[in-house]
Image (cartoon, rainbow, N blue to C red):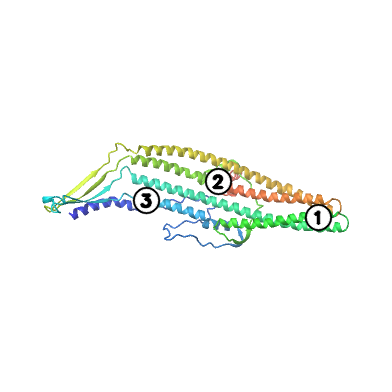
Amino acid sequence: MLTKFWTFSAILSVIAISGCMDYDNDTSWSEPRPLGQDFSTFQPPQKPPTTVQYAHEVAEPNGVITLRQVLALALVHNPELRAFSWEVRASEARGLQASLLPNPEIEVEVEEVGGTGERSGFDGAQTTIQLGQLIELAGKPSKRKRVALLESKLAGWDYEAKRLDVLTEVTHAFVKLLATQERLTLADELVQLSEQILNTVTQRVEAGKDSPVEKTKAKVALASARIEQKQAHQRLVSTRKQLAAIWGSISPVFEGASGQLDVTFPIPSESELMSLLAQNPDLARWAVEMERRRAALELEKANAITDPTIFGGTQRFKETDDTAVVFGLSIPVPVFNRNQGNILEARYNLAKARGQQRAVEANLYAVLADAYQALSSAFIEATDLKNEVLPGAQSAFDTARQGYREGKFDYLMVLDAQRTFFYAKARYIESLAAYHRARADVERLIGQRIDTVKTIQEKQVKGPKQ
């Protein structure tokens, strides 16, 4: 009896063993966009940790740091990106589960026991041992596995989008730190000039050439400059902490940032940048999303086909000590539930995805247009301030100072020229910061650095490939 039973069990085991195959999870991570692809990022191991890891060691940078150092540090240690990467692994695990077949069922049934007469006790018992297995038809396992695989790819695309978000966040914070340092330098310079002007005013007042009121004005101007200097110091401390928080640090030890805030690059045309929008992971993911929705529809159609359960085993008659083979087939009759609701929902979701894809594409084009305008405006403003406004303001301030020493102008003119000059310098710093922030936003949208974009003129000079 047992020999026949285990023979049948072996047959069902061959059917079920295909559900124990390893799930291929090497295709979940999408190919990095050109932007920042030369940096390593954190990818969790395939084997999860046995204990909860609340923190990881970060080698805090010291001294003066560069943007490249910060980008490399953040892509490995950013807490949000690290947490996001585990979602990719979780999606791989869901894919593994989706690839498994249903477990077989073993059933033991004892009949004709505990009765009366000859059927009392176990004398007339009939024992049946059988093994059952659900057989999934219409390719359900492969269809289910395909849906899970596409969901894993979507998680990979979402991780890539998060990676670009971190790059942009780091760039914004680093630019803010550079600008804050420049504003502190400007505040120091203003204090120094205010002290020099106060000395000049004091000498003229003591010589009887100016009213003591002018000295009071100069002291007020110096006090205001020192207040701005203290505030600039406080902003610098806060900005350093904001940057360090991106890689998970709460106590930064680096001294400052090194970078050329006043370096700008010519901007490609808007149409050239629009042509690169397909590299945006928020848009590129929708090709996979549409494929997943179609795969989900095919899976629901397959689920409408009922699956039989085959079973078989042996039956032993204790009264005669005989055995017999039993087998059977169970098929649900699709009278009421033909999965019609889930199929209809999958069709609706597919139609919805088409609309969402068009909406995302239209929105990204609008966002890129706004970012391009912000970049162009900041570039034009920074260029005009550098080439026209700053030289004129500098000349006017120098002339006013020299004229005041010679008694040609009063102190009010010097103060007005000084305010105009330093306001122009502060505005120049802000325009440069706005340029670099807008550039980071554009690069996030197109997935690559602007200075690597080949313009139409460059393509024409290079010519087509032979």
Query: Real-space Cα distance between discs 2 and 1?
Result: 55 Å
Image quadrant where residue 267 sits? top right
Report the front residue among 346 and 150.
346
Q: Give yes or no for contact between labels 3 and 1 (Cβ–Cβ under 8 Å).
A: no
Q: Which residue is drawn at 63% across and 58% down?
A: 237
| Residue linked to disc 3 | 97
Of badges 2 and 1, the one in the foreground is: 1
Q: Is residue 173 left or right of residue 80?
A: right
Expressed as whole percent of the image width and height from the top left, the position of residue 246 reads: 56, 55
Label ID, residue 3: none
Expressed as whole percent of the image width and height from the top left, the position of residue 150 reads: 42, 46
Image quadrant where residue 349 sits? top left
Q: Is mark 3 on a helix, strand or loop?
A: helix
| Residue linked to disc 1 | 216
Please tell me which of labels 3 and 1 falls first in the chain: 3
Report the front residue among 161 and 457.
161
| Residue linked to disc 2 | 446
Identify the amino acid type marked 3: Gln
Q: In this view, does 368 lie to the left or right of 422?
A: left
Expressed as whole percent of the image width and height from the top left, the position of residue 203 reads: 85, 59
Of badges 3 and 2, the one in the foreground is: 3
Mark 1 residue crowding within 10 angstroms, few (<14) / some (14–19) / many (20+) = some
Please tell me which of labels 2 and 1 falls first in the chain: 1
Expressed as whole percent of the image width and height from the top left, the position of residue 149 reads: 41, 48
Report the front residue among 37 and 16.
16
Quadrant showing the N terminus = bottom left
Identify the amino acid type marked 1: Thr
Q: Is residue 374 left or right of residue 145?
A: right
Identify the amino acid type marked 2: Ile
Q: In this view, does 99 lie to the left or right of 450?
A: left
Query: Real-space Cα distance between discs 3 and 1?
Result: 80 Å
